Amino acid sequence: MLSVKNIETWYDLIRALHGISFEIQEGQIVALLGSNGAGKTTTLKTIMRILEDDDQPEKGTIEFLGKRIDRMDTEEIVRLGISYVPEGREVFPELTVMENIQMGAYTRRDRKGIQADIEGIFKQFPILSERRNQQAGHLSGGEQQMLAIGRALMSRPKLLMLDEPSLGLSPLLTKEIFNIIQRINQQGMTILLVEQNVNMALKYSHYAFLMENGRIVRADKPEVLREDNDVKEFYLGIATEQSVKGYKRYRRKVRFR
């Protein structure tokens, strides 16, 4: 569905993406994982063409459903079938829940279809139906995340990209959001997910890429990555046998100084 080949993205004189390449198959949840500054958000923004003009990719190609999109306008990309939920949700705080959802359909002209999809969103997120006339800025973090996802679905995307959907949410709300993501995927939506909660991302995804310093350094199925010692230690916070032995050696050195 999506093919990213040898993309390099720069911020002024700083190279943020170092020739990254990856593919996403239709129907999957694919996780893009890594620490802060690894280049995950830049990757999503590069795909959506929402960086500053001077910061657009200088090399490589991006194809979606067989069409090159790396020189398209963002609106064209949305019309083609990609929708993006940014980090921090970024709902319109002074607009109502209903108005935010309607904004998600700004590229569409089919009024009956739009109305049917709005009702579908309210059915999928009952709490939004209850809050439909309330200003979005007064919603809780979890409710705003649901609203951001619902707004993105209004463009009828084939690929939904989510940037840190669990950011700032409690463990209970994080689980609820991931259950929503899984349910949307089971309805046929392909999802590209950027998430710092690596444990949750690996639990719900079908495939994952690990990024470091603007490069993809590892790609595999979640069950394989969960058993990798480096992933356990650096991403999941699980002490491996090797790290425990290293810590014990360090303690002995300190004790005998």
Image: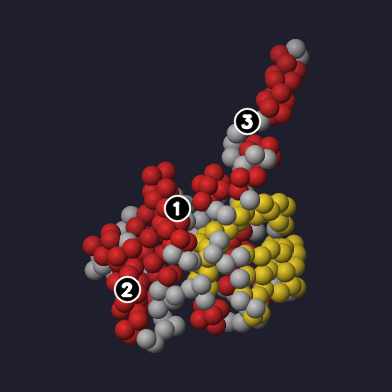
Under mark 2, the amino acid is: Ile
Q: Which quadrant of the structure image shows residue 223?
A: top right
- Compared across the picture, whether 219 is left or right of 131 comes to right
Give the camera-side residue of 240 and 39: 240
- Label 3, on which residue? 239
Residue 100: horizontal and vertical position, in percent? 35, 71
Under mark 1, the amino acid is: Phe
Quadrant for the N terminus, please.
bottom right
- Give the numbered dot on residue 118: 2
Under mark 3, the amino acid is: Ala
Residue 188: horizontal and vertical position, in percent? 47, 66
Judge depth for marks 3 and 1 and give the one in front: 1
Comes first in the chain, label 1 or label 2 = 2
Cα gap from disc 3 to disc 2, whole angstroms? 47 Å
Residue 226: horizontal and vertical position, in percent? 62, 42
Q: Which quadrant of the structure image shows residue 39?
A: bottom right
- Label 1, on which residue? 178
Tags 1 and 2 touching, CB below 8 Å? no
Q: Residues within 10 Å of mark 3 (few under 14, many from 20)?
A: some
Cα gap from disc 1 to disc 2, whole angstroms? 21 Å
Residue 64 seen by the camera: yes
What residue is at 61 percent from the left and 65 percent from the top? 25
Q: Secondary structure at mark 3?
A: loop
In the rendered image, the vertical position of residue 252 relative to residue 175, given as above or below:
above
Residue 37 seen by the camera: no
Tags 3 and 1 touching, CB below 8 Å? no
Cα gap from disc 3 to disc 1, whole angstroms? 26 Å
What residue is at 66 percent from the left and 65 percent from the top? 23
Q: Secondary structure at mark 2?
A: helix
